[in-house]
Amino acid sequence: MTERRWLRVRPGSRPTLRDALPALFVVLLAVATLVGGSVTIEADGATDAGATGLHAALDAQGRGRMLVAFDADVGTYAEVRPAVRAAFAQLVRDGASLSFVSLTGEGRALALAEIERLRSGGVEANRLLDLGYRAGAEAALVDATRSIVPAAATGTLADALRASGASVGAFDAVLVIGGSDIGPRAWVEQVGPRVPGVPLLAIAPSIALPQASPYLATRQLAALVVGARQVADYVAIVRDDATPTEARAAVRITDLPPAAFPVLLGIVLTLLVLAEAAARPGAAGTSR
Amino acid sequence: MRRSIPAALVVIAGLLLMLDLLVVNPTVASVSGGIVELVILLSAAAALLGASALAIRHTRGLVTPGADRVGSMLVLVGMASVLVPGLLSDQGAAAPAVTWVVNALLVPIGASVLALVAVFLIPAARRGMRIRPRETGLMLVITSATLVLLLPLGGPVGAAFGAAAAWLLAVPVRGVFAGLLIGVALAMAVAATRVMFGLGGTDD
Amino acid sequence: MSGFGWPEGWATLGVWVAAAATLLSWSILVGARRPFLWAQRLLAGMLTGYLALLAIREVLVPRLVAPLVSDPAGNPLAVVALVLGGVLVGSPWLPRWMGAAPVAILVGGTAAFALGGAMVGTVLPQIIGTVPPPGVGLASLGGGLATAVIASLVLIAFLHGAPRSAGMRLLGGIGRWLILGGVGVWLGYLVLARIVLLSDRLAFLGTEWLGMGR
């Protein structure tokens, strides 16, 4: 295998600065991440309705039973991860129990990592329950409205859920962690009409925002935090809300919101390249 | 006759599930519960079928002259790296070896590949501008305006941008996506009805 | 992925392998396509293997194999599922009409869920939701009306198959431009999400792998 087969080089041409643009983009972002990575996106006075809404909705659960429908994916989880961990911190602090279920493979993989993180973070075993993976997408959601606690699940939480019917209706609320596949929309469509008494709350990545926000407007979602800005707002509220002792516990299982400087630079660079692309659409560039 | 069996199954399964959504009846609930269980188990079997087909295809690729043998080998290694430890351990997907593969390979590769979207937008935008300049131009102007509003700025400018972004989402964007949601849902409903009743469609 | 734990004793190797996997995936940035494609192949294999593992260990074994082993006579549904599942897996070698039976149940079920969910969960609530409620303030009423008008225009554009008059064609044209605008907004949010992801991977390389910065 020759070096020429490994590298993509246009025949008869020498690499130009334009070819190096993608790599330059990443290098600049790397510098910004390392230099200014500790400054996070700050909340605009922490008044965002989505963030305050989720905080209030989780607060209302108190020591309740929360079903965490964890279907994040690896392409979007980085964006919502701080809010997810802050929500777990808020729920754990308030004494709620967390039961995890996933309908996608990637969601299951990430859920297992988060369950392990909570366990190693000191959350008691009787407040965590792994309900596992369920195949069939919409069919699995419909099935969950009849039965969601597997026969193999043991412990006081599993027993308590069985005593309350062992379905979605046995929970006080559902926190949907959405990705690009299964997310708030599927839960609203399949579970909402069948179990109307259980509020659906959601944390979703930016790309789900246009799809999910109409359901917040119709109150089919009781609360929705979506995208980096609302994530930052929500994390700030949870941190401000904690007492010093609670803050220590919360910090242990929360994450920093996205860093501001790399995001700022990334947006500016994207705007520049979009402007360049619009100004010179015919220019030869990399065709990757 | 043979062709009508699958069509009849589609109609029966679909109607029973629809009926269960609309009326409360223990018998219908019990039967539709059985269908739901079948759909779940068949979905899992279909996933297994897909994995088997992929494994067979890439096993053949290993011995086919001219095929990407390294690529086929990597697909098979990737499958084995989670399947073997997961099947051997009592913990299944929660086995430490599976967790390690997920954290060390699956998540980093998946996230790294998808992270390049922002970078690859450059040639995609240029191509779009060449092919459909008016449509792509409008789209990119709105994308750029959205990105400006999403700039993580503090102070009054950041607050003003935040307020503008919130209004955009609450009124025009909500309108567009409410319309799209209704449209997509109606299209899905029409397609689903056609499938269930075999209207203008396939024979099996 | 930042902040995830590693099995005891495997952290250092895990971080190094994750860093190598990240760099391999980004090899295309310097024009090296082949390693990038290899990374994609490895990812496809792992994702497929993981799904197969979940299907076996978390669905088929507890919901099909276990009931059949413990009490086959008491689980007729499991027997039916076993037969249909067997037919589905063996469909490449069976007559087409036989393989179509389990597919028909899957299709019928999926269609019914899609139809029911779309109508009850989206169409009706969204139509009601786009109509401004009585008694709201002037600003809210204006916003609500604008939303309803925009949604209607988009819907007209979306239902492009229906025959229309010149007026409807004009409205549909406006709706089409509105859809393009909506896609533009969505693209903006997608770019932001990917910038955050890129920054997250870079932070991983800098902090967890090289021990620098944050």
Image (tube, helix red, strand yellow):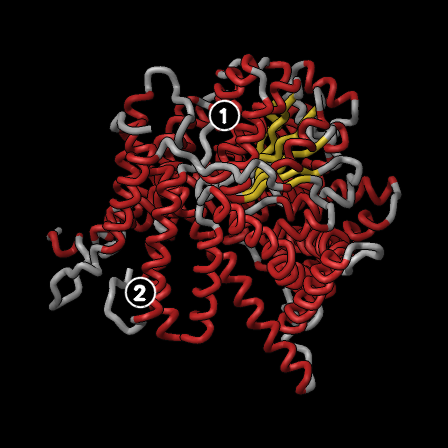
- Asked whether A94 or B2 is in front, the reply is A94
Which numbered disc flags the more N-terminal residue, 2 or 1?
Answer: 1
Q: Nearer the viewer, residue B203 or C134?
A: C134
B137 displayed left or right of B48: left
Name, please, the residue furthest toward the bottom.
C166
| Residue B96 pos. (x, y %) | 42, 22
B135 left or right of A198 in image:
left
Q: Residues within 10 Å of mark 1 (few under 14, many from 20)?
A: many
Residue C165: x %, y % from top left: 69, 86
Q: Residue at x 35, y 34 (%)?
A: A37
Quadrant housing the N terminus of chain B: bottom right
| C12 versus C125 height, above or below | above
- The residue lying at 16 percent from left, 56 percent from top is A5
Report the chain holding disc 2. A
Q: Seen in the image, is C206 located left or right of residue A104?
A: left
| Disc 2 target residue | A276
What is the secondary structure assignment of the residue under circle 1? loop
Q: Is residue B75 visible?
A: no
C-alpha separation, residue under disc 2 versus residue under disc 1: 39 Å
User: Residue A254 got which mark?
Assistant: 1
Whether pointer 2 and pointer 1 mark residues with C-beta atoms closer than 8 Å, the reply is: no
Q: Quadrant of residue B167?
A: bottom right
* Mark toward the viewer: 2 or 1: 2
Which quadrant: the C terminus of chain B? Answer: bottom right
Task: Name the residue type under label 1.
Answer: Thr
Count of numbered tags: 2
Residue toward you, C87 or A33: A33
Q: Nearer the viewer, residue C28 or B89?
A: C28
Which percent across, then down, holds residue A71? 55, 39
Secondary structure at numbered mark 2: helix
The x, y position of residue B9, in whole percent, is 72, 55
